[in-house]
Amino acid sequence: MEHIDIGVKRGACPRCRSNGKDRSGDNLALYPDGHSYCYSCGYWEISPLRKRIENKMTSSNVITIVKLPDDTTGYLPIEAAQWLRQYGITAQEVEKHKFMWSEKCKLLICPIFGADNTIIAWQGRNFKTKLIPVFGDLTDDPKDGKIQYGDRSELDGPKYFSKGQLGDILHIISPIKNVCDPTTIVVVEGVIDAIKVGRVFNCMPLFGSHMSLGTLRRLKARFITVGVWLDPDKTVEAVKTALRASQLMRSFVVVSTRDPKEYDINQIHDMVLYQSKTDIRPAIDKQT
């Protein structure tokens, strides 16, 4: 006797019907989760829920090609070149990472390339400024109110602009020569930070200060230890990120008074190596 689970309904099988069979309209077993199966001809349909899950998984793995501003060029103006130079970025690194410039948007752009050499994301540093009037009190008679003494320049808009699914990208920068510790990855906020730290250690920019669980899992498959080195104003977020990471892999925090990009190669080497000796989990457990 054929066994049908409780909750399973019967319906007509379209394949059997097309072949002139299943006149009673009950060959197809309809299961509670939405999938169906015909025990007569083997016809089946996937559950709508599973379809939605698979579609979501597929779409999350598709990297969309993004466009650059239409006036983007490889020529960097003096202001952009000087800004890179102040952090010790060399001409070879500018060429390697394909830095670009958009005069219309006043953006210094670092593109992220996919496996087929197409641009899948980019981050741009804003150089657009605006003049803000500076006012002060009249020295002769303060009752007359304020007087404009001049103007000061101020950044117009956010410091950084980004395009693409940056949260899904592992943009790992590694030393040209031997990496200091191949089992360790250091995560930082921006591309310039990653280039500097990446001279000594494997390094990856978060394009911000947040690291998702999915990113952590992907890093765990490649590394044993993750170090979190965010800018000084993000120390609390760095500790939280390291604690979250410690659930999957060994983690530590690099605490500094300046941004990672402001240190030279020897300082980066010593700071990361020294602070990597302190595992975030035992340190927190000791305090609690």
Image (cartoon, grey):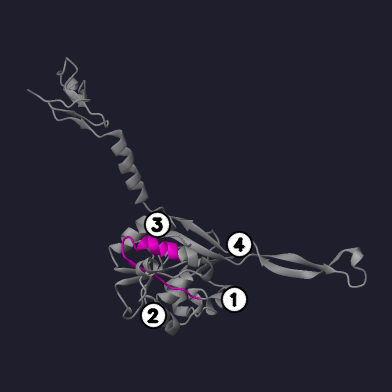
Instruction: Check contact, mark 3 vs mark 2: CB within 8 A.
Output: no
Q: Residue furthest top?
A: 24
| Label 4: which secondary element | loop
User: Would you name the residue on which mark 4 appears?
Assistant: 104
User: Would you name the residue on which mark 1 appears?
Assistant: 78
User: Would you name the residue on which mark 2 appears?
Assistant: 274
Tell me the CA gap for discs 2 and 4. Answer: 44 Å
Q: Earlier in the sequence, mark 1 or mark 4?
A: 1
The image quadrant where one finds the N terminus is top left
| Label 2: which secondary element | helix
Q: Residue at x 31, y 80 (%)?
A: 178
- Circle 4 crowding by C-alpha within 10 Å: few under 14, some 14–19, many from 20: few
The image quadrant where one finds the C terminus is bottom left
Q: Nearer the viewer, mark 3 or mark 2?
A: 2
For this view, does 286 lie left or right of residue 133?
Answer: left
Q: Earlier in the sequence, mark 4 or mark 3?
A: 4
User: Would you name the residue on which mark 3 appears?
Assistant: 212
Residue 199 visible to the viewer: no
| Label 3: which secondary element | loop
Q: Residue furthest bottom?
A: 266
The residue segment tinted magenta is 239-256
| Label 1: which secondary element | helix
Q: Residue 8: which quarter of the image?
A: top left
Q: Amino acid at mark 1?
A: Ile
Q: Nearer the viewer, mark 2 or mark 4?
A: 2
